[in-house]
Amino acid sequence: MTTRFAGRTVLVTGAGSGLGRSIALAFAAEGARVAVAGRGAAPLAETVALIEKEGGTAAAFTADVSRSADVRALVRQTVEEFGGLDVAVNNAGVFRGGQALGDLPEEDWHTLLDVNVTGVLLSMQAEIAHMRANGGGAIVNISSNLGTHQRRAGTGAYAATKAAVTALTRSAALDHTGDGIRINAVSPGPSDTSMSLLPGESPAERAERMRDQSPLGRVSSGEEVAAAVLYLASPAAASVVGADLVMDGGASA
C-alpha cells in the first residue's frame, strides 16, 4: 500500500471486470477509498472483496450510466458513504460490431450511443455538479485508440462513439478547468480483457495475433492502463488538461 491517494475518494464506473477492476484495485492500493459501480452486483462484490483482501477500502453501487437518475444517485451514494468525491473514472463501455457498418443492427447503434456517449456525458455532469461545489477534482474518461486515432474494419460505430468520448473530454476540460476540475482521457488499444478477444479466440491465440498486429508485439496489461489513469488523476499531472493519452503499443503511431 502506498499513499499517493490517501484520504481521497475515487469513483470508477464499469468496475466489475476488465480495465475498470484493474483501475479500482490500483487506486485502492495507493490509499484511496474506492466506489465501484456497474450494472451487476455480483461482479462489483468481487472487486470490493479483492480490494479489501489487500487492506483497501471500497463500496459497491449498482447503476446504469445511461440513466441520469442512476448516475446522480451514484454520486450521492458515494459522497454519503465516503464524505466526498475527488476523482472519477468513467470507464463503463460496451462493444458492438464485427460487421460492416451498413449491416450494423440499429439496436446495436443505440446501445453504443446510450452507454459509450450518453453514459459518459451524464456521468460527467453528475460528477462536475459535485466537484464544482466542493473545491474541484479530477475526471478521467476511458476512450479508445479506435476513433480519433485509428479505424479498423468492422468497428465503425464503436469508433464513432469513442471519438465522441475524446471530443466530450476536451470540450468539458475547457469548460470546467476554471472550476478547478481537470478532465482528461486515456485511449487504450487492445488490452488484457475479454473485449480484445475475437469470437472464439483464446488468450494464447490473441497473444500470437498481437505479435504481428502491434508494433509492441503484445496487448497492454490492465495495470499499465491503470498506471496512466492514476497519473492523470494525480497532482503530478496538475497542468495536464484536455489530454487524450493513447496507449496502444504504437498501433496508431
Image (cartoon, rainbow, N blue to C red):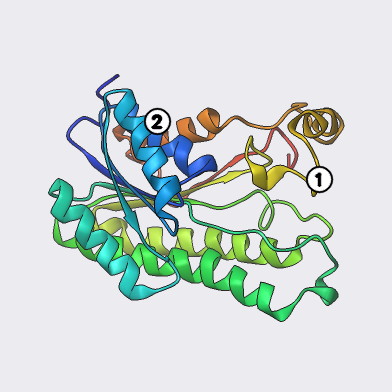
* Distance in Å between CA atoms under marks 2 and 1: 30 Å
Residue 72 lies in what quarter of the image?
bottom left
Report x, y in % for residue 123: 37, 64
Is residue 79 depicted above or below 249 in this figure? Answer: below
Report x, y in % for residue 10: 29, 44
The residue labelled by disc 2 is 26
Q: What amino acid type should be assigned to the residue bearing mark 2?
A: Ala
Q: Residues within 10 Å of mark 1 (few under 14, many from 20)?
A: few
Front residue (pair 253, 61): 61
The residue labelled by disc 1 is 200
**In this rendering, position of residue 62 left or right of residue 158:** left
Which residue is farthest top?
Answer: 1
Front residue (pair 201, 166): 201
Residue 27 visible to an observer of this rendering: no
Q: Give the residue at x 40% y 39%.
A: 47
Residue 240 visible to an observer of this rendering: yes
